Amino acid sequence: MLALAIDFARRFARNRAALVGFVLVIAVIGIALSAPWLFPRNPLRIVGRPEIWPFTTSRYLLGTDSLGRDIAAMIAYGARTTLLIGLCASLTATIIGISVGATAAYFGGWVDEILMRLTELFQTIPNLIFVLTIVSILGQKIEYVTIAVGIVTWTPIARLTRAEFMSLRDREFVQACRSMGMGNLRIMFGEILPNALPPVIVLSSLVIAGAVLFESAVSFLGLGDPNVSSWGGLIGDGRTLIRTSWYICAVPGMAIMLTVLALNLVGDGLNDALNPKLRDR
Amino acid sequence: MAADPGLNRPPVLAIDKLQVSLFTRRGVLPAVDGLSLDVAPGETVAIVGESGCGKSLAALAVMRLLPEPPARIVGGGVRFMGRDLAALSEREMQRVRGKDISMIFQDPMTSLDPVLTVGDQLIEAIRQHTEASWREAANRAVELLRQVRIPDAERRLDDYPHQMSGGMSQRVMIAMAIACGPQLLIADEPTTALDVTVQAQILELLKELQTRSGMGLIIITHDLGVVAETADRVVVMYAGRKVEEARVGALFDRPLHPYTRGLLGATPSAIRRRGGRLAEIAGSVPALSDLPAGCAFQNRCPDVFDRCRAERPALATLLPQQSAACFAAEKELSRNVAAIGA
Amino acid sequence: MRRIVIRRLAQIIPLIFAVIVLNFVLIHLAPGSLFDVMTAEQQVTDPAMLDQLRHTYGVDQPTWVQLAKYIWSVMRFDLGFSYRQNAPVLDVILQQLPATLILMLSATAVALLVGVTAGVLASVKVNSIWDNLISLGAVFFFAAPSFWLGIMMTVLFAVKFGWFPVGGMRTIGADHGAFADALDVMHHLVLPATALGLFYAATYARVMRASMLEVFRLDFVRTARAKGLSFGRVLLAHVMRNALLPIITLLGLQLGTMLGGSVVIEAVFSWPGIGSLLFDSVMSRNFPMVLGVLVLGSVLVAVCNATVDLLYMRLDPRIRAR
């Protein structure tokens, strides 16, 4: 097991872009975790003059926004929001997706048919519109945003899980387990799932990236939780000042872009590391 | 066998010490190492060898269709009707391909574009090298399909490749190849991917088309049965080198090179004669990156001796119109000559 | 072939049905009752009207009757009434729909033109500086949020250079003939369509590149070259036709996402489509409109998916046979 992990790490490390992505992700996590130490006070507090440009004073490295809040602090705390929502939403999506996909593939027949229709339904409904609908109905709290984002991003995971399960379902080791009297749930989650996991893991890094983009769109529109600072929200707040202080929009946007970029690179790296035969082109 | 066609006329194709190398991560591999070969008009030359011996690469090199990384011509020349093909620009070469020299490939099912009709692809071949209008080309296409004995030719124009069987697809490929009356047709394993029952038909068709047009024909194969059916002359390749060349009758009656003997020993008819046991040549082809000094066949050769490991045998004409690159064969023959002389 | 078309279109019906049911569920999650949602009861004062509405929506009856009545009203194209615009929901949506369609079509055109060209270029000059630049660009535009791109583009091209307007679909107050009007709209369309389309261009570029490289290796490409075709002809007549097939599949899958993306872009550029409408309705708690947009959006996506599926079948003869 350890040898496998080391081999995997080595293959991953060979892809330089993936390494850069990995470092970036660690950096973002680092900033998110250390935000309370770097900026001990509430980032939404007004601390200085409004509309100070970045890199002009040493106190506010990234400048201040329209109300005079420290952008650097809001970016740091925004990292927490982003990562939290990203992770929780994709966890939700992964749980739903794996359950649906595994059940559909394992039981087949009309169960498969119904679940696939359900998947198709959620694929047809325009994602962001659905998220906005849910948020407008349930309310603008961070939990509802997370759930809403999770609900619209599970479909690719379900499809992938189903495909993987279907190729594994009829293999001999499954039949052996069944003849040993193992229950269905045990076989599904104990035996098949660990083997089906690698491509799903690759997909989940992309799902996290997607969740980050969704959340930023929701908070940009002003429908996120007003009590937390979020990168999308920052961009939304800065919209009215693009003629004079466009950095208020530029900085958080760069943060989102770098994070999503990093996640994509890591996803590509994971993909290459797990499918070595496709790499040597 | 009938009198040799065109033995005294200038060759359609003259390959001279052709060298093709593969530039890979593991180094530079000599995939074709000094191959020389002539094809006379109306003659069928078979190139035989196991997969990986370089025969397909040699053919692609003639057409200048080598996969550019990693393969490249690094030495020697190819002359077609006296013209040096290596000196031609890509545009000039495009005028040669499909018109003067044509090539058909191993798997006809994947060698045709799946999203275009058979007719479209045939017409494209015709209009590429002639001034024909679409209508004229379509008529010619129907004619060609009839020539390759495809029934209901007019209807077939609108078929897609996946609607055809392997045998029919290969006939279409042949039709495309002869569309502009080439002087040389190269067939790379034309029957390998086909049913046994269809193989003979395709080979017969090729021979018939050759007789009618007088074009040269190169058949690349690993199947000695195909060689026996179609070839006038045979070239045997091993690990990128030519190891024997002879008229087909002579090759089967009196193979000089131990590798050729081994191949013949492994043919089904030979097995029947021997009473059922399949004689395999022990060992396997050495990797191009691992070629031994001296003769490439040394590790599998029943007649190997010291000189084989030290020196690389050159191709020598050991009998009238039969040459081989083998020290053992040389030794054997000179002993016979000495015996006769004495 | 006609049978296949009908069959594919018929598959949409259960989907729409499910969307309507889902809508119903969502309505019940909303504060207030179904009745409130469909009638904005607070604003209706005429008691006779109220009674009639109560009857239509079966307020006092069991849930499944309400569901049936709701489905029935949707089938009759009654999506409720919006007091904010003082008009039936469906009418308002249909009025704003063309603007969104224009935006989406233009964005798709941008995405295909830029993406496919970039992908082909990258594959033809594989591993060269161009290939690396294009891949870098693709990665950048894939990761950047489209609304942020829109804002940055506005800052650069509208504010700093003044080449394009900052927002809106038409120049206010100008009274042009039809042709000049079309040009005006196109002028306003450039920034939003590009901002929306670049994300998809990035995806198409990556997929096209991979697809082209795949197809290059296939046997029939060698046959085409052996026929003496020039490289350009091989590329256009054979390679691209085959390599484009996965892009078409992708197109279908992206439509739902693009409709969502247009919501944000319309907000950024004040583009008067259903995205702006949705945004406005969410802010003003105008539930009938929100849910109406959801239903109609889903119908749109379902129809587009079916169309793309049929298009794919038309283009790939191997599928047609089945």
Image (cartoon, rainbow, N blue to C red):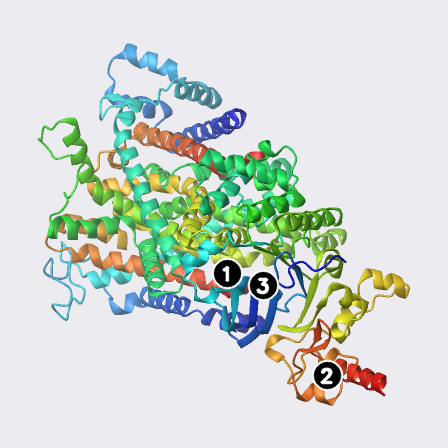
Using the image as rendered, state which of residue B314 and residue C98 is in the foreground.
B314
Q: Residue B231, how many percent across, how many down?
A: 70, 59
For mark 2, does the 10 Å Cα neighbourhood hold few (<14), some (14 to 19), or many (20 or more) residues?
A: many
Label 3 marks a residue whose chain is: B
Q: Nearer the viewer, mark 3 or mark 2?
A: 3
Residue type at numbered disc 3: Pro
Q: Amino acid at mark 2?
A: Phe
Measuring from the top left, give residue C266's x and y in whole percent: 24, 40
Which is more toward the observer, C314 or A266? C314
Residue at the disc numbered 2? B327
Query: Given the image, on which type of amino acid does mark 1 rest?
Result: Leu
Q: Which mark is residue A252?
A: none
Q: Mark 1 or 3, which is nearer the eye?
A: 3
In the structure shown, which secondary structural element does the residue marked by tag 2 occupy?
helix
Instruction: Write the residue at 55% across / 52% down.
Output: B182
Q: Earlier in the sequence, mark 1 or mark 2?
A: 1
Q: Give the residue pinned by disc 3.
A: B11
Q: Which label is found at residue B65?
A: 1
Q: Nearer the viewer, mark 1 or mark 2?
A: 2
**Nearer-N-terminus badge (3/2):** 3
